[in-house]
């Protein structure tokens, strides 16, 4: 009798787990958020905020700015949930919004800098708040060099490289996020990888020799 009760409880637990998983699937979260369920959208934020912030950081190169733009991305997503097609993957849609938000920020920064230059005032560089690498921490130093190299790529290559290499997006997802054709995505990725290897190789060769 006890064994039957344990089996029944175990089965009930598995059912509840499956039900919870279904309730927290992207499709269900979107549906609940569209109905005004703030808890559902909070779960969406918790699930995707970190990769979205990392992607924006790859574009703008500043941690604090990336965090601010991540908040802006999710505010815009919340306001435009009705524009999300049911067949469209939530992460792809969010990355598309993040790309637009980051690009708008860059364009605003460029305009502000141009206005300052035109007004004949000293041009103030944006501060780089990335941590100063400790010479004894090789991984931190390499990460800094990689991020600097990514920042030196042109915008199209930087987007494609970040999405494919750092965020493991498919060519189809990248094409949807960026609006590029798949052939362009592949070409830009190939060129970005070649440029990254060229920029990082001297550092790796020096490390290997030391």
Image: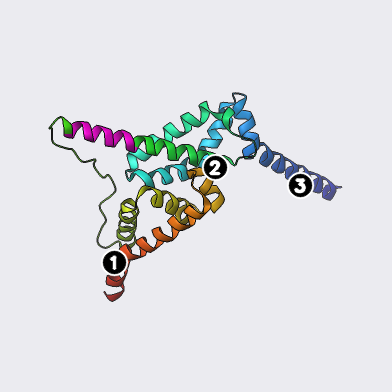
Q: Is residue 210 above or below residue 68?
A: below
**Residue 189 percent across, percent down from the top left:** 44, 57
Left or right placement of residue 187 versus residue 64 in this view: right
**Residue 93 percent across, percent down from the top left:** 54, 39
Would you name the residue on which mark 2 appears?
91
Cα–Cα span, label 2 and label 3: 33 Å
Of residue 10 and residue 210, the one placed in the foreground of this image is 210
Residue drawn at point x = 32 percent, y = 51 percent: 151
Residue drawn at point x = 47 percent, y = 40 percent: 49
Q: How crowded is mark 1: few (under 14 residues within 10 Å), some or many (20 or more)?
A: some
Left or right placement of residue 56 versus residue 207 in this view: right
Of residue 7 and residue 120, the one placed in the foreground of this image is 120
Would you name the residue on which mark 3 appears?
10
Cα–Cα span, label 1 and label 3: 55 Å
Prevailing secondary structure class for the magenta stretch in the rendered image: helix
> Tag 3, which secondary structure?
helix
Q: Nearer the viewer, mark 2 or mark 3?
A: 2
Cα–Cα span, label 1 and label 2: 34 Å
Q: Which of marks 1 and 3 is in front?
A: 1
Residues at badges 1 and 2 in contact (C-beta under 8 Å)? no
**Residue 42 percent across, percent down from the top left:** 53, 32
Q: How crowded is mark 2: few (under 14 residues within 10 Å), some or many (20 or more)?
A: some
Between disc 1 and disc 2, whose residue precedes? 2
Q: Is residue 24 visible?
A: no
Would you name the residue on which mark 1 appears?
203
Residue 110 on the magenta segment: yes
Occupied quadrant, residue 32 = top right
Provide the residue span drawn in magenta. 106-117
Mark carried by residue 27: none
Q: In this view, does 194 lie above or below 9?
A: below
> Tag 1, which secondary structure?
helix
């Amino acid at each position: 009798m006890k064994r039957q009760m344990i089996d029944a409880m175990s089965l009930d637990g598995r059912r509840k787990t499956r039900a919870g998983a279904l309730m927290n699937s992207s499709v269900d979260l979107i549906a609940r958020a569209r109905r005004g369920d703030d808890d559902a959208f909070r779960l969406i934020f918790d699930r995707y905020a970190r990769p979205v912030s990392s992607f924006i950081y790859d574009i703008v190169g500043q941690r604090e700015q990336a965090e601010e733009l991540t908040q802006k991305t999710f505010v815009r997503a919340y306001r435009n949930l009705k524009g999300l097609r049911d067949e469209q993957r939530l992460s792809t849609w969010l990355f598309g919004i993040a790309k637009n938000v980051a690009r708008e920020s860059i364009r605003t920064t460029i305009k502000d800098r141009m206005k300052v230059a035109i007004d004949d005032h000293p041009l103030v560089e944006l501060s780089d708040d990335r941590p100063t690498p400790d010479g004894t921490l090789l991984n931190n130093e390499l990460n800094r060099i990689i991020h600097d190299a990514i920042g030196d790529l042109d915008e199209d290559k930087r987007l494609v490289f970040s999405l494919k290499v750092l965020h493991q997006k498919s060519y189809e997802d990248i094409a949807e996020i960026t609006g590029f054709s798949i052939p362009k995505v592949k070409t830009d990725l190939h060129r970005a990888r070649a440029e990254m290897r060229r920029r990082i190789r001297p550092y790796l060769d020096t490390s290997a020799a030391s």
